Image (cartoon, helix red, strand yellow):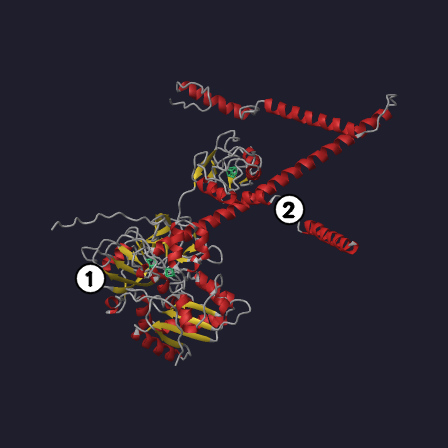
Amino acid sequence: MFQLFKFNGGVKPPGNKAQSVGQPSATAPLPARLVVPLHQNIGGTPRPVVKAGDRVLKGQLIGEADGWISAAVHAPTSGMVRDIGAYVQPHPSGLSAVSVVIEPDGREEWIERQPVDYRNLPTDAVQTAIRQAGIVGLGGAAFPTHGKTTPAKGVPMEELIINGGECEPYITCDDILMREQGEGIVRGTAIIRDLMQPKKVLIGIEDNKPEAIAAMRAAVAACGENFDVVAVPALYPAGSAKQLTRMLTGKEVPVGKRSTDIGTQCFNVGTVYAVWRALALGEPLIDRMITVTGNVEHPRNWRAPIGMPIADLLALGGPKADTDGVILGGPMMGFVAPDLTVSTVKATNCLIARSRTLFPPAPPEMPCIRCGECARACPQDLQPFEMYWFSRARNFGKTQEYHIFDCIECGCCSFVCPSRIPLVQYFRFAKSEIWAREGDKKAANSAKERFEYKKAREEREKAEKAEKLAKAAAAQAAKKAAEAAATGDSLPVTTPTADDAEAAKKAAIAAAMERAKAQRAAVQPRNTDALNADQQHAIDAVEARRLQAGLETPAADNENPSS
Amino acid sequence: MLIAIAIMALGAVILGAMLGWASIRFKVEGDPLVEKIDSVLPQTQCGQCGYPGCRPYAEAIAKGEEINLCPPGGAEGVQKLADLLGREVKALDAEEKPKQVALIDENTCIGCTLCIQACPVDAIVGAAKQLHTVVAKLCTGCELCVPPCPVECIRMEAIPETIDNWKWKHPVIAIQPVPARKVA
Ligand code: SF4
Ligand code: SF4
Ligand code: SF4
């Protein structure tokens, strides 16, 4: 039997998952238009490679990855590019960013799909193929997948973990994917296994999904692989990469290290499935499974194109009359969509229709009573009440001493807090302030460096100029002396001394200044000076026409003749 | 008695030599206080404090100058300086401005290079009679390039909020009306 480890803390919120797995998944019908944001990944913003008015095919590249940590973006269907512009993003800020608007033509015409022969390609070629297919972590982090497939130097890869935990309430997209596409997931896992060469492959699934566990076991057997499908106890946040790694291996990633530094790596089941589709079928990441649930008549999982407006997706579920908003992601870590025009992105895993009965408004925050509940619930072994106190007081240095950057924003602390303090919001606030400050600090340091460099350069240039002038003056004085000697002048010839050189230099500077002055004084030539006969002729003709039309000769250049 | 004096004297000579060696070996370069103050200042190099750059102002602060003269540093900068120096926090002696970046209107630019010479951080690229442009990433928003431009084609623009520089706000506690209690 597989030996499981435990993590501290965790909570058990009501699952609310049964509603949306009652039916198999379905493919969402194409909406009237797709708004595909370009920046859907962590890292560089892809550059648009199409323009308004272009016709694109399904799977055609529309955004080219920029930098190694970046992932390409593709057209989810065939149609016309209508616009490339700023559209509101599915982001808590509600700000806009560049998106490509595609009007589907309904023909679903694919590009030529070319499977990648990944077995016979070197690692970096396979990684590039994954990057070109636009694959990012589909569990929600959206980190470009190819960037995670390089083991740390000198650390042997022990365990490759495939995350089918899906611990957040309401979300069932991974569950349904495992039930329906087990083989694809197993084959995708095998591709990553070949890239990273781990000793073991573990597929961790929460034990509240027995169907998925059975399906995955069957798929592993069918593919003849030796992956371990492990049922882990359902305890939020068991589906977080860090907690799942800890449960399956007993290992914890030290502060400031990556999971590959301890010989593990974790991928979401949806991600490995997308890898398989990209390499084995040649289909880039253009759609994904999304759970539509909450206050709707027909909760279900939909295979929806990336860029589908959430209003259209929500309509498929039949929202009830009292729906007053949509949560993107789960109730623990998700956020309320800024408005219904925003579209789905690669990281969108769930849409929850919100209503006052399902999600009553947060009760008012009360003072912290230092009960310590939050610390007991924290799966990262942090002390949320301390971090809360310092975040609130904007004492960011202290929050870092309490390791605020180890907080995974799981929301367990807020969930258990009897004073109903929105702790995670304070942590997010503190984290983004710290990031901004670090950015400012970096900018200040680089500005200082550049300023000092400029000063040094100016000094050097000054010195060089002075030296040049001195040399020229010395040469001149020597020449004069030679001339004087040649003409047999009896004037006492002084050898060029330092004084002389100085004087000559001054004279040279004065002369240069004089010249510059003269140049400034000289009127700039106009383009009507120095004309040849042809040009003069043409001008005369124009003037004659002007006279005929009763127009004055334009006295001032920029005066409008018609006024 | 003599031996005691000799031992003490020898001790003094040896310890003195060690101290002398240590003071050379562990010599602190520059003025560490100025260094610390300078690292708190925003390095905009704008001269709005009345000194020709951040470092001269840092030196002046170390000599007792007021700590509230740096507009780009803002109230937070004053707070940091106060914390560092154990002085009292004062209101900023200027208006706090949002961060800005210089923008050259490329249709009007005549390529005179005057702004290039004015920019303290080499954030403007261009050559004589060629169009100039500001490298926004390097621009500190100091405004020093604005006055020298003979055709007034440089303007300062506030840096817009984008998803990349957006920050989570400090949570606010919403005040909610309490339903009136029924009087029995
Ligand atoms: S659970 Fe809430 S009230 Fe209790 S210590 Fe933590 S923050 Fe304070
Ligand atoms: S949100 Fe952060 S502090 Fe709160 S329980 Fe989760 S990891 Fe711990
Ligand atoms: S471009 Fe202008 S505003 Fe920006 S740093 Fe240079 S001189 Fe200052």
Q: Position of residue A257 (x, y in %)?
A: 49, 63
Which residue corresponds to mark 2? Answer: B29
Q: Tell which of A71 and A524 is nearer to you.
A: A71
Secondary structure beneath label 1: loop
Label 1 CA crowd tier, 10 Å (few <14, some 14–19, many 20+): few
Image-based side of A81 in relation to A193, left or right:
left
The amino acid sitting under disc 2 is Glu
Alpha carbons under labels 1 and 2: distance apart: 73 Å
* Residue at (65, 38) in percent of width and height: A459
Image-based side of A14 in relation to A512, left or right:
left
Which residue corresponds to mark 1? Answer: A297
- Of all chains, the one bearing label 2 is B
Q: Position of residue B139 (x, y in %)?
A: 50, 41
**Looking at this rendering, what residue extends furthest in the bottom direction?**
A1
Q: Tell which of B175 and A223 is nearer to you.
A: B175
Q: Find residue A101 and name its label.
A: none
Q: Position of residue A50 (x, y in %)?
A: 41, 52
| A237 relative to A561, above or below | below
* Residue at (54, 25) in percent of width and height: A526
Q: Position of residue A96 (x, y in %)?
A: 36, 48
Q: Nearer the viewer, mark 1 or mark 2?
A: 2
Instruction: Using the rendered image of the protein, determine whether residue A37 is visible from the camera's viewpoint.
Output: no
**Looking at this rendering, what residue extends furthest in the front direction?**
B1
| B79 relative to A481, above or below | below
The amino acid sitting under disc 1 is Glu
Q: Is mark 2 within 8 Å of ligand 3?
A: no
